Amino acid sequence: MGDNRFKLKTDEDALEGQRASVSLLSLQELDVSRRELYYENQHWAYFERLRHEDPVHYHEESLSGPFWSITRFADIKAVDENQHLFSSKLNVTINDQPEDFQLPMFIAMDQPQHDFHRQTVAPIVAPTNLAKLENTIREYSIKILEDIPIEQTFNWVDRVSIELTAQMLATLFDVPLNDRYRLKRWSDVASNGPGSGIVESNEQKRKELTDCLDYFSDLFDERKDRPPQFDIISMLAHGDATKNSPSNEFLGNILLLIVGGNDTTRNSISGSVLGLNQYPSEYQKLLNDRALIPNMVSEIIRWQTPVPHMRRTAISDTEIRGKAIRAGDKVVIWYISGNRDELIFQEPHALRIDRANARQHVAFGYGIHRCMGNRLAEMQLRVLWEEILKRFKHIEVVGEPVRTKSNLIRGYLNLPVVVHPL
């Protein structure tokens, strides 16, 4: 693939470098909720120890309060699919929502309410509509790729990953393309708190999300008075489960759909370029056989795991691996650990684009809350890489990435690259 000006560290390198210092910590010190671990890519050895030594681990103290960490693949799936024991109602993230700014959303509901709400917007990602969207994705991808600088350093995150996902969001919501950066900003604000570099205070976060509510409320009012159209706002305005939603629930569902349609895909796009540069032999494998693109997409999503965790709340007393979990306990399922479980994936920290069981990953969740837009996310990655390989022989990463400071979204703020044409 050519000589990089420096050698990128792989996740395997990072893990190897972390093991010695992490081995000196007590289990109680392995607080995997700390945001700086993800910013510094320093979480791998923490999860490795938890998987091997205490896969159902109780953290008595953390900035998010006490919680259980579930780190083995099989246990993650078991919790995720059992809504009768582990509820999504109170919240789906490790932190609790402020009492005076509660934002209900259908991902934080159990059946049957969850299904009624989800079915309202599910047609936007139904197979018939995905077939139509593929042409739109391709048009956007081609224009974005034809506009990027050649043989010059630029930030792949801004110029490609954000552009494609923001344009697709604007299309799905049927808002002007010029407003796409507002959608991206609201996505960032919704999934980050003070200290993340995105917002400085909870007051700022609330103000910006209120602006988001005002923007979409105007669109909602317009579209409820018009015949139903095939966009998300119109679906919410006419759906039996959502047309009379209180404003906080409306905002909650809007933010869920924005974050789900933006953060996960954009960070997998950036992760694909980073991963293929960390493993140049895999990049060469892709250049030699473009038929590997669909499987590569699954492997990238496993390897990246753009949403590291989801949280459930125990409904009644129960046990996992002999550990007594009490009603009301927070139970955090760490997808990022399950996707690196050595019992399921050989050499789990390595990127292997022809990995036979790549699609087994839990990056999209499992059970009734499995990501509704998973096929759309995969399609964006697939189409983008089809177009990349028609134009470029190498997208070269020329500096270490700047990662997000978050335990909810595993992503990138900056990925410096130089593009080399065919």
Image: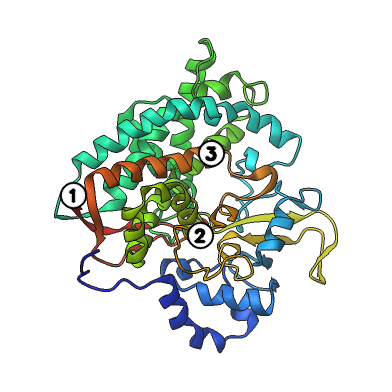
Q: In the rendered image of this protein, does residue 52 appear above or below residue 355?
A: below
Decide which of 288, 325 is in the foreground and name it: 288
Place of residue 377 in the rendered image (x, y in percent of width and height, measured from the top left): 47, 42
Between disc 1 and disc 3, the foreground one is 1
Give the labeled residue for mark 3. Answer: 373
Of all residues shown, which one is farthest toward the front?
288
> In the image, 74: left or right of 49?
right
Q: Is residue 326 left or right of residue 276?
A: right
For label 1, the residue is 422
The label shown at residue 355 is 2
* Mark 2 surroundings: few (<14), some (14-19) or many (≥20) residues within 10 A: some
Place residue 78 in its image quadrant: bottom right
Q: Residue at x 47, y 51 (%)?
A: 295
The amino acid at mark 2 is: Arg
- Residue 123 position (above or below residue 167): above
Q: Residue at x 53, y 42 (%)?
A: 374
Residue 127: quadrant of the picture: top right
Q: Earlier in the sequence, mark 3 or mark 2?
A: 2
Mark 1 and mark 3: span between their CA atoms? 33 Å
Relative side of 49 to 186, left or right: right
Dots 1, 3 in contact, CB < 8 A = no
Compared with residue 386, is residue 415 higher up or lower down, i.e. above or below? below
Q: Quadrant of residue 362?
A: bottom right
Image-based side of 422 in relation to 45, left or right: left
Q: In terms of secondary structure, where does tag 2 sit?
A: loop
